[in-house]
Amino acid sequence: MSRTLVIGDIHGGLRALIQLLERAEVSPEDRLIFLGDYVDGWSDSANVVSYLMELARENSCIFLRGNHEELVLRWLKTGKTYDQWLEHGGQASLESYARLSQHEIDKHIDFFEQLYNFYIDQDNRLYLHAGFTHARGPEHEYTDVPFRWDRTLWEQALSLDPTLDKDHPHFPSRLKLFEEIYIGHTPVTRIGEDKPYGKSGVWNVDTGAAFKGKLSLIDVDTKKVVQSDPVYELYPDEPGRN
């Protein structure tokens, strides 16, 4: 039976991604939904993108756009760097891309430009990197910035009284729109969790792989979680993101 597997923020940790997919025994029958932030952090940023492009040749993959893809694409197209980006994982991407040919870089630019802002499946589950702000849904946003940068969706889901259900008049409109919402962007390690965590219908799959956490995936139907080793242990000579 095919599965829908959602993979959290990778941040250049190719060794963790390969380990994760092996542990999950992923097959071509599975649908893989990647929540973005493939780059910036560990030394394999460019290699992660190359690996994902190859993976999509044999597997059903949905690739969403994260804020770090936006930053790397901007640099690849303009050559401009930003101190804040370099300090938050960009330096590792810069060094990683220095090992690619221009032909390979052009393919990566095409990949970045074709990423989805959000995806809604046949069971009315929404997948996106960060969040959305419009009460009527992501397709009504005036700009695509929230899809990559918003944290209010997750903050709102965490702050809700657990006794409220979707029929309650005070339940937020945007959280009523979908059966479930899957996001990354904000590591759950910030709230003391180390596995994908769900509240108020929002599941956060970013388990801090860029820092001291593991890379995780979750089966949306069974909620079974598979994780890599802590990514920093797979890159013992690197600082990752501080």
Image: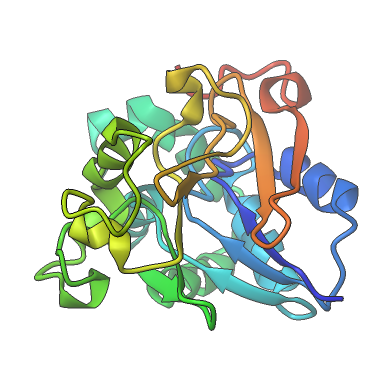
- Relative placement, left or right, of 131 versus 189 is left
Residue 45 sits above or below residue 228 on the image:
below
Q: Is residue 101 left or right of 144 when viewed as pictured?
A: right
Q: Please give the name of the residue rendered at 23% of the width and 77% of the height, measured from the top-left corner.
A: 139
Q: Position of residue 25 (x, y in %)?
A: 90, 57
Q: Nearer the viewer, residue 180 or 56?
A: 180
Judging depth in this view, the residue of 137 and 78 nearest the camera is 137
| Pick the front one: 34 or 160 | 160
Q: Residue furthest left?
A: 142
Picture coordinates of residue 176, whole percent (x, y): 30, 63
Q: Quadrant of residue 207?
A: top right
Q: Residue at 81%, 75% (x, y): give it.
A: 2
The residue at 40%/42% (across/down) is 185
Left or right placement of residue 37 versus residue 45 in this view: left
Q: Horizontal and vertical percent for residue 43?
A: 61, 35
Question: On screen, 41 above or below 52?
Answer: above
Q: Quadrant of residue 73?
A: bottom left
Q: Is residue 98 visible?
A: no
Q: Quadrant of the N terminus?
A: bottom right
For the C terminus, the quadrant is: top left
- Residue 75, above or below 109: above
In the image, taking residue 99 as reference, residue 70 lies left or right, namely: left
Instruction: Locate residue 112, reporting x and y percent.
Output: 43, 68
Give me the residue at 57% from left, 17% from top: 239
